[in-house]
Amino acid sequence: MADRVYPSAKPNPQPPSANNSGGGGRPPSFPPSKGQTYGATRQAYRPQPRKLPPPPRRRRGCCCSCCLWLTLIIVAFVFLAAIAAGIFYVIYRPRRPTFEVDGLRFSAFNVSGDGQLTSRLELNLTAFNPNRKIVYLYDAASISVFSGGVDVGDGSFPAFIQEAKNATLLAAALSAPGGQTLDSTAVSDLKKKTRLPLEIDVDTKVGVKMGGWKTKKMRIQVRCEGIDVGVPKGKAAPAVSSPTAACKVKLRVKIWKWTIP
């Protein structure tokens, strides 16, 4: 009877692989070097994305908001002013004063050969206040009378207060300004005329009083045109003329160096 052969419990060792020169086996493994260990643990370089600076704050929105609020404030102010003006007009019904020439005459008029003018005038002017609740406060007024651009008389009215629904008669004596020398054409024209067309300018300041409230005084100009007055000849003075003159009242507002009529 043949004997059985049992395999050994120890595994047979693998034969050593041949060198590169001798065959196609794997090369022997060596422990990694220090440089290989450092390179294995270091992470690969990845460029970081560039951070852009934050965009500047937009000022356009702020400017638009400011303009919008400013516009709303102006509109509200105009609206309130219109309401106040409407209430004021309903309560007081303001009307501008009116003026009328009641009488004007030359008491003396003479033009010398060397161009010197001598004249005396008597002027009566009536001021009307048509308002029921408004009082006018007048400063002293200056008066100038012209004929064809020649100043034939200057004078003044005193300051006065004109109550509501009142007519005030103003009288003044005027005379030609001294130092005025006329040219030959003006001298010849004035000597041969028996009647002179006149224009009257009155400059003053007036304020308004309503109850206990007073306004600042503003400059006005009263201009009366269409007046024709006889010139005295010899010793006989002409009678007082009562012309129907159209007198206009203009408000003169002065802004710095300019006067707006």
Image (cartoon, rainbow, N blue to C red):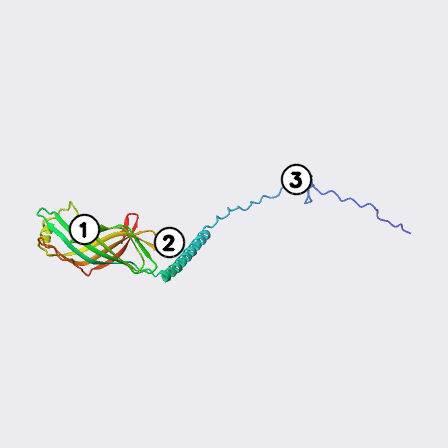
Which of the pair 68/248 is nearer the observer? Answer: 248
Name the residue at 17% across, 58% down.
Answer: 227
C-alpha distance separating marks 1 and 2: 36 Å
Residue 139 screen position, x and y as percent: 28, 50
Which of the pair 170/84 is nearer the observer? Answer: 170
Q: Residues within 10 Å of mark 2 (few under 14, many from 20)?
A: few
Furthest residue toward bottom: 90
> Helix, strand, or loop for circle 1?
strand
> Helix, strand, or loop for circle 2?
strand
C-alpha distance separating marks 3 and 1: 123 Å
Looking at the image, residue 153 sits to the left or right of residue 168; the answer is left
Check disc 2 and report the residue beneath it.
Answer: 213
Check disc 1 and report the residue beneath it.
Answer: 174
> Helix, strand, or loop for circle 3?
helix
Looking at the image, residue 116 sits to the left or right of residue 125; the answer is left
Looking at the image, residue 213 sits to the left or right of residue 47; the answer is left
Which of the pair 49/80 is nearer the observer? Answer: 80
Q: Amino acid at mark 1?
A: Leu
Q: Residues within 10 Å of mark 1 (few under 14, many from 20)?
A: many
Looking at the image, residue 88 sits to the left or right of residue 220; the answer is right
Q: Amino acid at mark 3?
A: Thr
Label for residue 64? none
Mark 2 against mark 3, which lies toward the viewer? 2
Q: Earlier in the sequence, mark 2 or mark 3?
A: 3
Please identify the quadrant where the C terminus is shown. Answer: bottom left
Residue 197 screen position, x and y as percent: 15, 57
Check disc 3 and report the residue beneath it.
Answer: 37
Name the residue at 16% across, 55% down.
Answer: 105
Q: Earlier in the sequence, mark 3 or mark 1?
A: 3
Mark 3 against mark 1, which lies toward the viewer? 1
